[in-house]
Image (cartoon, grey):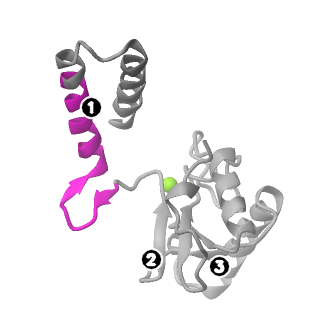
Amino acid sequence: MKSGISRIESKPSFWRWYGFDLDGTIADNTNHAFGYGNIGKPIKRMTDLMKRLHSKGYNVKIVTARLGDVGSNPRAHEELRQHIWKWCDRNLGFRPEITDRKDASMEALYDDRAKQVVRNRGITYEEVNTRLAACLEEAVKHLPKVSIKDKDFISECLKVLKKCKV
Ligand SMILES: [Mg+2]
């Protein structure tokens, strides 16, 4: 299954944009590759999604705290942008806008640290998954007539949900 794209609006709009964090999301930071001259290897599943969205006309941006970390000096910002764009040339084939802030036009943010909350409900999807997994486990116990095929499907769902708990 192609990652992510199914939950994205069906047509690109000129003002909405999709943010992708850099370190740990589109670039591997296993070795804490945070140094100025150091951007990790691309994480293919995410860079492929960025490329796919870009090729379909969606506005994608890199959202990184690195910009804030270099202070407010415009020259330092420009140097950092150029540095990240060189990485983009090699790994994306295009140069997305780079920012360190969200705004009202940001439709979604892909980020390794964010915990997604169900809008206006005060609950994380992590909690929803945990509750759903518990419900499915109960359902399996109380549905002995479920076919083997369905049980296999439910078991697979449970495995996925348990992984999502992190
Ligand atoms: Mg990150």
Vertical placement of 156 versus 24: above or below?
above
Q: Residue 92 carries which label?
A: none
What's the CA distance linking mark 3 and mark 1?
A: 48 Å
Q: Can residue 114 be seen in this view?
A: yes
**Residue 101 lies in the magenta-colored region:** no
Residue annotated with mark 1: 133
**Crowd around label 2: few <14 · some 14–19 · many ≥20 (10 Å):** some
Q: Name the residue under label 2.
A: 102
Left or right side of 119 for 42: right
Q: Which residue is drawn at 75% across and 67% down?
A: 55
Q: Name the residue under label 3.
A: 76
Front disc: 2 or 1: 1
Identified by mark 2, the residue type is Lys
Mark 3–mark 2 distance (CA, rounded to whole Å): 21 Å
The number of discs equals 3
Q: Are marks 3 and 1 in contact (CB under 8 Å)?
A: no
Measure the alpha-carbon separation of dots 2 and 1.
32 Å
Q: Is mark 3 on a helix, strand or loop?
A: helix
For the point 58% across and 81% down, the residue is 13
Q: In this view, does 58 lie to the left or right of 104?
A: right
Upstream in sequence: badge 2 or badge 1: 2
Give the position of the N terminus as an image quadrant: top right
